[in-house]
């Protein structure tokens, strides 16, 4: 398995599990049946950290939607190159850092971590196009 394959898989696995903290908070706040019910205006609000974690998860999915097809294309076209693997690592670190920092509630660092992940996708695309 290449470094790009490894970190792309790890990113997908992270996103498959990143909903757990905020859903557990929802169960704690609203109870099991309340957490499984359709949302409504009378719902008790979740903890602030859980609301931020939910938004961070959504942002992570959006980041991954841009990164994953580029990563797959790089796996096909540039299988032996090191730069895509490094970009996979920086994407993963940026996405994880963004989730944690956003959940904690640190605004400026959150944006910088997002930028690391987003720029990794941009650089991967430029690498594929031969421009980086």
Image: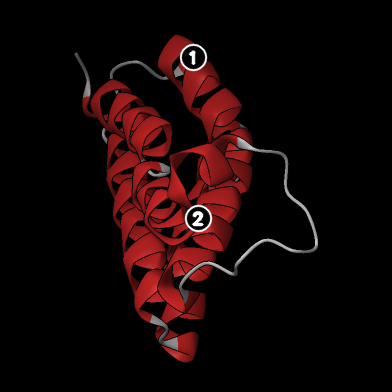
| Residue 30 in view | yes
Picture coordinates of residue 64, whole percent (x, y)? 54, 39
Q: Residue at x 52, y 67 (%)?
A: 46
> How far separated are the C-alphas under marks 1 and 2?
49 Å
Q: Which residue lies under the disc numbered 1?
A: 77
Mark 1 residue element? helix
Res. 30 mark: 2
The crowd level at tag 1 (other Cα within 10 Å; few <14, some 14-19, many 20+) is few
Quadrant housing the N terminus: top left
Q: Nearer the viewer, residue 34 or 21?
A: 34
The vertical placement of 62 against 129, above or below, is below
Which residue lies at the image location 29% right of the left edge and 55% below the top edge?
93
Q: Classify residue 106 by image quadrant.
A: bottom left
88 horizontally vs 118: left or right:
left
Above or below 104: residue 13? above
Badge 2 marks a residue whose secondary structure is helix
Foreground mark, 1 or 2, reads 2
For residue 85, side relative to residue 125 (left or right): left
* Residue occupying the far right of the picture: 41
Local crowd size for mark 2, using a 10 Å CA cut-off: few (<14), some (14–19), many (≥20): some
Mark 2 and mark 1 in contact (Cβ < 8 Å)?
Answer: no
């Amino acid at each position: 398995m290449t470094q790009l394959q490894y970190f792309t898989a790890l990113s997908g696995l992270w996103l498959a599990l990143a909903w757990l903290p905020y859903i557990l908070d929802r169960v704690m706040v609203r109870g099991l049946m309340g957490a499984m019910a359709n949302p409504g205006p009378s719902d008790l609000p979740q903890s602030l950290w859980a609301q931020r974690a939910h938004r961070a998860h959504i942002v992570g999915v959006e980041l991954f939607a841009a990164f994953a097809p580029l990563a797959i294309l790089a796996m096909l076209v540039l299988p032996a190159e090191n730069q895509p693997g490094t970009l996979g690592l920086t994407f993963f670190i940026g996405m994880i850092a963004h989730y944690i920092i956003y959940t904690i509630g640190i605004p400026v660092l959150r944006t910088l971590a997002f930028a690391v992940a987003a720029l990794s996708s941009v650089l991967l695309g430029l690498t594929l196009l031969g421009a980086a």
